[in-house]
Each structure stands twice: as structure tokens, then as C-alpha cells.
């Protein structure tokens, strides 16, 4: 239970950082999406139902904090967890190359879904401009994988130990 509480606190902190501090850090309008990376890594090591619940809750909180139409980020983060779930394998946990590639795929899926949702919600964004920013954002997200990867691996092992003790 405690590791999930720690993850919830970490996720809330990352959502607040994403909404308040990172918009000021993007020099050319591109910033890493720490929420996306954290949810992708969590979705790759935990059950999909758990990851989808975290993604939806984090997306709603992010929408409330950045005053986006409610549900936009919640919907856009769901494919990220699906990509994480589909990448569950030994290769994901054996090194950083596979998580980096999955971060690229998840970031582009997230950007594409936001691009599709944009006109439905009344925001006019150039598809080519959104694609460029999506690729740059994906590259920045890939830089965020190594530190968050270590943290998620530690939390996942901790949960595994607690669940093993509960079964014994």
C-alpha cells in the first residue's frame, strides 16, 4: 500500500510541476512531459487497469490546473499507458534502449491524439507545427526516462516484496 501512496504523491507532484514550473522552462515552446514518461514507465511494470486509473486521474488534475477542457489530457494519456502495457516484457526491464523507444512511440501517440482532439475542442493548431513540436517533445521525454526509470523500478520491486509477503 505504501509504495502506491508514494507513487500517488510523486504523480501529483509531477502533475503540479508540469502545470506550473515547466511552462516557464520551455524556451521555444517545447518542454518534457514528465507525467507522460512517469505513466508510461508505471504502465510497463504494473497492471493495465492500475495504469489507466492513474493516467485518467492525472489527466483530469492536469486539465484542472492548466485550465484545459476537462478530459483532454485524461483521454490523451490513456494511449500512453496502453503503449506501456504492450511493451511489458523482459526487454523493457533489461536496459534503457527499449523504454526510450517506447517513450518515443507514446509521445507521438499522445501528440497525435491531442492534434485530433484540438479541432473538436475549438483550438486551431497547424498539423505540421504540432508534428514538429511533438517530435521535439518526444526527444525531450526520452531524456527524462533514465532517472524516472530507476525510481519506477525501485517502487515496483518494493510492491513485489509486499505482495509476496502478503501471500506467504
Image: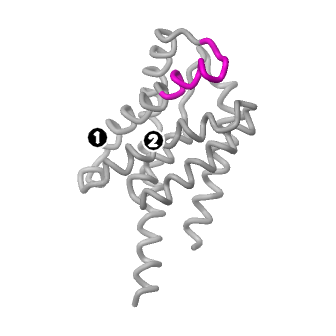
Q: Residue furthest bottom?
A: 168
Q: Check disc 2: other Cα within 10 Å, few if <14, some if 14-19, many if 20+.
A: many
The answer to whether the residues at label 1 and label 2 have Cβ atoms under 8 Å apart is no
Q: Is residue 122 magenta?
A: yes
Q: Give above or below for 117 relative to 44.
A: above
Secondary-structure class at tag 1: helix
Residue 32 x, y percent position in the rendering? 54, 31
Tell which of 136 and 67 is nearer to you.
Answer: 67
Circle 2 sits on which residue? 80
Residue at (56% x, 21% y) in the render: 30
Quarter of the image where one finds residue 31: top right
Residue at (46% x, 14% y) in the render: 132
Magenta residues (range): 113-124
Residue at (47% x, 71% y) in the render: 159
Image mark count: 2
| Closer mark to the observer between disc 1 and disc 2 | 2
Q: Is residue 117 magenta?
A: yes
Q: Check disc 1: other Cα within 10 Å, few if <14, some if 14-19, many if 20+.
A: some
Q: Which mark is residue 75?
A: none
Tell which of 150 and 6 is nearer to you.
Answer: 6
Residue 119 x, y percent position in the rendering? 59, 18
From the viewer's perspective, is 65 left or right of 59? right
Q: Secondary structure of the magenta portion, mostly?
A: helix
Residue 38 x, y percent position in the rendering? 50, 47
Secondary-structure class at tag 2: helix
Circle 1 sits on which residue? 97
Alpha-carbon distance for marks 1 and 2? 17 Å
Amino acid at each position: 500500500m505504501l509504495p502506491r501512496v508514494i507513487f500517488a504523491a510523486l504523480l501529483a507532484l509531477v502533475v503540479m510541476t508540469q502545470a506550473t514550473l515547466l511552462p516557464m522552462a520551455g524556451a521555444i515552446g517545447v518542454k518534457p512531459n514528465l507525467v507522460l514518461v512517469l505513466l508510461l514507465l508505471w504502465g510497463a511494470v504494473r497492471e493495465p487497469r492500475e495504469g489507466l486509473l492513474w493516467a485518467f486521474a492525472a489527466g483530469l488534475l492536469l486539465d484542472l490546473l492548466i485550465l484545459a477542457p476537462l478530459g483532454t489530457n485524461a483521454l490523451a494519456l490513456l494511449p500512453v499507458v496502453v503503449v506501456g502495457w504492450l511493451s511489458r516484457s523482459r526487454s523493457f526491464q533489461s536496459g534503457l534502449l527499449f523504454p526510450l523507444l517506447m517513450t518515443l512511440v507514446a509521445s507521438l501517440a499522445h501528440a497525435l491524439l491531442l492534434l485530433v482532439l484540438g479541432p473538436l475542442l475549438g483550438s486551431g493548431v497547424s498539423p505540421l507545427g504540432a508534428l514538429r513540436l511533438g517530435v521535439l517533445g518526444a526527444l525531450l521525454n526520452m531524456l527524462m526516462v533514465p532517472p524516472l526509470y530507476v525510481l519506477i523500478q525501485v517502487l515496483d520491486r518494493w510492491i513485489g516484496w509486499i505482495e509476496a509477503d502478503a501471500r506467504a
